[in-house]
Image (cartoon, helix red, strand yellow):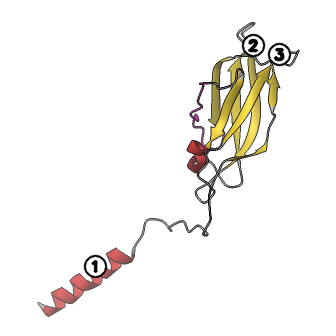
Amino acid sequence: MKRLQNIFLILCLFLVSCSSSDPIVCEDRACTMEFRMVTVKFIDDSGNAQIVKDYSTVNKRTGRSMTPNTDMVVQGLYVVASDADLKELSEKGDIVLVSATNPKNNTKIQAEFVIGGGLCICHVSKISGPETIKI
């Protein structure tokens, strides 16, 4: 009986010591409570803001559609990524493909952004990409 208890104790120790993955350890950071967004503005040849249709953003690394907020505060200004997408992005930056359709001639427009985020990062950031896209 004593031998059975020892075997059971050893098995319990093995099970407790196993972990499926290494935990992510982040340095201590003081993050602000603000909610940040990376945006892009669609403009015409004259520089006037334009509303587009079928706006979408896709993270090329994961293949996942990001969830843009298409409710514009400013006409023609669209969200590429926000702090809501932070954990889906890598710290080194992911290529995010932005696509939309010009409602006047149904031409599809695409642009690439590099957006940084990650589990240990406070806010999303634009590493590269245009401020405006001409349609």
Evaluate if marks 3 and 1 touch, with contact meaning CB atoms under 8 Å apart. no
Write the residue at 80% across / 25% down. Answer: 133
Write the residue at 71% across / 44% down. Answer: 115
**Alpha-carbon neighbours of circle 1 within 10 Å: few (<14), some, or many (≥20)?**
few
Q: Front-most of 42 and 118?
A: 42
Could you tell me the amino acid type at mark 2? Thr
In the displayed orientation, state which residue is furthest to the left: 1
Q: Front-most of 127 and 107?
A: 127
Evaluate if marks 2 and 1 touch, with contact meaning CB atoms under 8 Å apart. no
The residue to which callout 2 is attached is 107
Could you tell me the amino acid type at mark 1? Cys
Q: Earlier in the sequence, mark 3 or mark 1?
A: 1
Could you tell me the amino acid type at mark 3? Asp
Q: CA distance from mark 3 to mark 2?
A: 13 Å
* 130 shown above or below 122: above
The residue to which callout 3 is attached is 44
Query: Viewer-nearest of labels 3 and 1?
Result: 3
Q: Main secondary structure of the magenta part?
A: loop
Looking at the rendering, in which quadrant would you find the C terminus?
Answer: top right
Query: Viewer-nearest of labels 3 and 2?
Result: 3
**Alpha-carbon neighbours of circle 3 within 10 Å: few (<14), some, or many (≥20)?**
some
Q: Front-most of 116 and 16?
A: 116
Q: Position of residue 11 (x, y in %)?
A: 28, 80
In the displayed orientation, state which residue is furthest to the top: 104
* 90 shown above or below 21: above
The residue to which callout 1 is attached is 12
Magenta span: 59-71
Mark 1 residue element: helix
Mark 3 residue element: loop
Looking at the rendering, in which quadrant would you find the N terminus?
Answer: bottom left
Query: Viewer-nearest of labels 2 and 1?
Result: 2
